[in-house]
Amino acid sequence: MDIFETIRSEMPTMRKSEQKVADLVLSSPDIVMNGSISEAANLAGTSDPTVVRFCKQLGLKGFMELKLRLASAHPIDKTVLEDITETDSVNSIFTNVMRSVVEAVSSTERGMDRRMLEDAVDAMVAATRWEFYGMGGSGIIALDAHHKFFRLGVPCVAYNDSHMQVMSAAQLDKNAVAVVISHSGVTKDIIESAGIAKKAGATVIGILGKKNSEVAKHCDIPLCISSREIALRLAPKAGRLMQLALLDTIFVAVAMRIISEEGFDRLDKVKRALLGKVI
């Protein structure tokens, strides 16, 4: 029994609020599959918990499993990522990817909350410890951030292991900043790490793909990039580049605020050490 048959068979036993969610899924599966849980709740005229109850009624673990089931229920859909299909030429794929990047850059620049961006830089400058958390592809972004920021002389670390994240987050305090990175905003490990870091007193900065995501609720400063990709089949491409660009912006702004003559000497030492690695 596919997901649509399951929904139809379970609808008579659902509450009226849950039936609203069922109606939305049956009438507009693509919207649900490509949106957040909050967007689905708003469109159905219900709440996030109601959507969760709806998923449980279907025997699913949560909203993400619903999205995956909806995606798998469209075998005739040959879309790999956004407007790209398996029959497209390399030239067509190249053009599509480049356009999506340009679109994401433009949308992110227009949509970025500049006050929050300033708050993020202020928090980083004031902190005595920086930590970066990410899982999967976002874990690679966290490692890249550590590669940049540790040169500035502030204790800095990146974790892409969920156990290390929660152990470290629990030991943070009001002088620390935890930067959590998540394109989807629904990864349970990142949500947990962000919550523990915030409870410990740290300032939590989010590098996120969705404004109303679950992890954003645990962020003091949620910074959202813009890209239209959903990445149920492939990892985000434009979204990943926007995360890197946003962290680059914060890095440069922080560096300009805290680097003294001693700091420039430190950067020069790093550069000289790296020169020894080339032939």
Image (tube, rainbow, N blue to C red):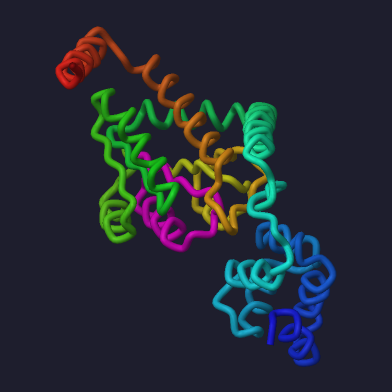
Q: Residue at x 80, y 62 (%)?
A: 43
Work out whether residue 111 can be spotted: no
Q: The C terminus appears in which quarter of the rendering? A: top left
| Location of residue 56 with respect to 273 vertically, above or below | below
Q: Within the image, what quadrant is residue 132 found in?
A: top left
Task: Find out whether residue 191 is within the magenta segment.
Answer: yes
Q: Within the image, what quadrant is residue 65 found in?
A: bottom right
| Location of residue 26 with respect to 214 vertically, above or below | below
Total labels: the figure holds 0
Q: Within the image, what quadrant is residue 59 found in?
A: bottom right
Q: Position of residue 37 (x, y in %)?
A: 66, 62
Work out whether residue 159 can be spotted: yes
Q: Nearer the viewer, residue 229 or 247?
A: 229
Q: Residue at x 65, y 53 (%)?
A: 86
| Location of residue 74 with respect to 226 vertically, above or below | below
Along the horizontal axis of the image, is 40 left or right of 271?
right
Residues shaded magenta: 177-203
Q: Residue furthest top?
A: 261
Along the horizontal axis of the image, is 149 left or right of 213?
left
Task: Find out whether residue 273 is within the magenta segment.
Answer: no
Q: Position of residue 103 (x, y in %)?
A: 69, 32
Q: The N terminus appears in which quarter of the rendering? A: bottom right
Along the horizontal axis of the image, is 276 left or right of 6?
left
Along the horizontal axis of the image, is 172 left or right of 28?
left
Q: Nearer the viewer, residue 274 or 47?
A: 274
Q: Nearer the viewer, residue 32 or 94?
A: 94
Q: Position of residue 60 (x, y in %)?
A: 59, 79
